[in-house]
């Protein structure tokens, strides 16, 4: 996401008051989501007072090229012009002026501000020194002074210099404390801060695509589970078929009953006798009596016929 920071316009002489408007969209709390943020090794916020809602974003970069890239892509500003510069502060405001056609009412200029951040300060590893911090803190203090427009009460507030000196001292102290707390003074080599993978916000289209993929995966899992259940049922039927046939045939053989004319029908779990060569009714009755005397545990079906080839 790129913040709404239009290029600066010149301020025209006007006899009416300037309007103030929040920039849309506002800057996020996590600046690693902005374009060109790959070179940021540290990000933090400082305030002028403990209860202030206005913040200055403090960024530390691997090198000057990473700082310049972020200023151009992430903030929409031109990069610092001098390659010898190792720190920079930019106020997060812009003036928008309108040039209506002749004969139409003039519109007052609009001062666009971010609702939270009044400036951003960028530093480079290897150059985290008090002279840079102090220098940039003064620039940040001017940005803060313009933002609050005299609403802040300082001691000796009649002296205009105090409206810059007080916030400059507090901003410099806060940056120094921030760098100490996170050991940035001791870790001024790029190798101490490996580049972290960029965290991007998912678009609504991407979120919807992920949801569809998850739903398709769930359907696929359900299909696979259904197929597995079907195969398990087939294996269970085969196991039961083999178990019944084995024990049934063993029981008949132990009783001396011939099984040459026996077959097994698995669906009704029934032993079917005489399917290959039908028995006569008399032979079938004798076989049925022999089986009943064994207390055979399975249903028995015996085919019998009076019309048997070779018999009269």
Image (spheres, rainbow, N blue to C red):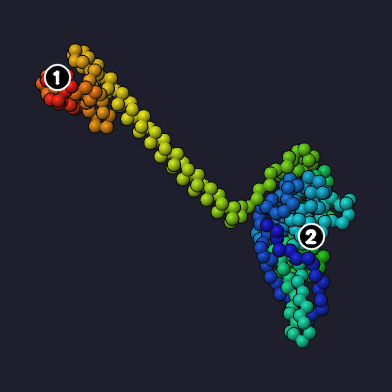
The quarter of the image holding the C terminus is top left
Q: Which residue corresponds to mark 2?
A: 77
Closer to the observer: label 2 or label 1? 1
Establish if 185 lies above or below 1.
Answer: above
Residue closer to the observer: 21 or 127: 21
The quarter of the image holding the N terminus is bottom right
Q: Quadrant of residue 298?
A: top left
Asked whether residue 296 appears in the rendered view, the answer is no
* SS for callout 1: loop
Going from N to C along the chain, the mark reached first, 2 or 1, is 2
User: Does residue 171 appear left or right of residue 131 in this picture?
Assistant: left
Establish if 183 lies above or below 123.
Answer: above
Q: CA distance from mark 2 to mark 1?
A: 111 Å
At 27% from the left and 32% from the top, the residue drawn is 267
Q: Residues within 10 Å of mark 2 (few under 14, many from 20)?
A: some
The circle drawn on residue 181 is none
Residue closer to the observer: 257 or 53: 257
Q: Which residue corresponds to mark 1?
A: 311
């Amino acid at each position: 996401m790129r913040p709404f920071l239009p290029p600066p316009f010149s301020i025209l002489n006007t006899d009416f008051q300037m309007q103030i408007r929040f920039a849309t969209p506002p800057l996020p709390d996590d600046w690693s989501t902005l374009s060109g943020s790959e070179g940021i090794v540290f990000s933090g916020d400082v305030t002028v007072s403990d209860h202030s809602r206005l913040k200055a974003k403090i960024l530390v970069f691997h090198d000057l090229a990473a700082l310049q890239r972020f200023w151009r892509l992430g903030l929409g500003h031109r990069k610092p012009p001098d390659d010898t510069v190792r720190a920079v502060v930019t106020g997060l405001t812009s003036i928008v002026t309108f040039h209506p056609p002749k004969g139409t009412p003039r519109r007052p200029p609009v001062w666009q501000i971010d609702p939270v951040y009044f400036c951003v300060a960028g530093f480079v590893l290897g150059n985290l020194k008090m002279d840079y911090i102090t220098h940039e803190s003064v620039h940040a203090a001017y940005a803060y002074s313009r933002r609050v427009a005299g609403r802040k009460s300082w001691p000796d507030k009649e002296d205009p210099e105090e409206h810059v000196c007080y916030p400059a001292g507090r901003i410099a102290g806060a940056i120094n404390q921030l760098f100490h707390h996170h050991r940035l003074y001791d870790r001024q080599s790029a190798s101490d801060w490996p580049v972290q993978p960029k965290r991007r916000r998912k678009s609504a289209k991407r979120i919807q695509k992920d949801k569809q993929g998850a739903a398709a995966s769930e359907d696929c899992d359900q299909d696979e589970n259904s197929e597995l259940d079907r195969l398990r049922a087939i294996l269970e039927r085969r196991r039961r078929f083999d178990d019944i046939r084995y024990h049934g045939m063993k029981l008949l053989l132990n009783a001396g009953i011939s099984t040459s004319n026996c077959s097994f029908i698995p669906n009704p779990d029934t032993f079917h006798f005489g399917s290959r060569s039908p028995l006569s009714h008399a032979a079938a009755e004798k076989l049925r009596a022999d089986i009943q005397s064994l207390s055979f545990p399975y249903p028995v079906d015996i085919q019998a016929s009076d019309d048997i080839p070779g018999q009269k």
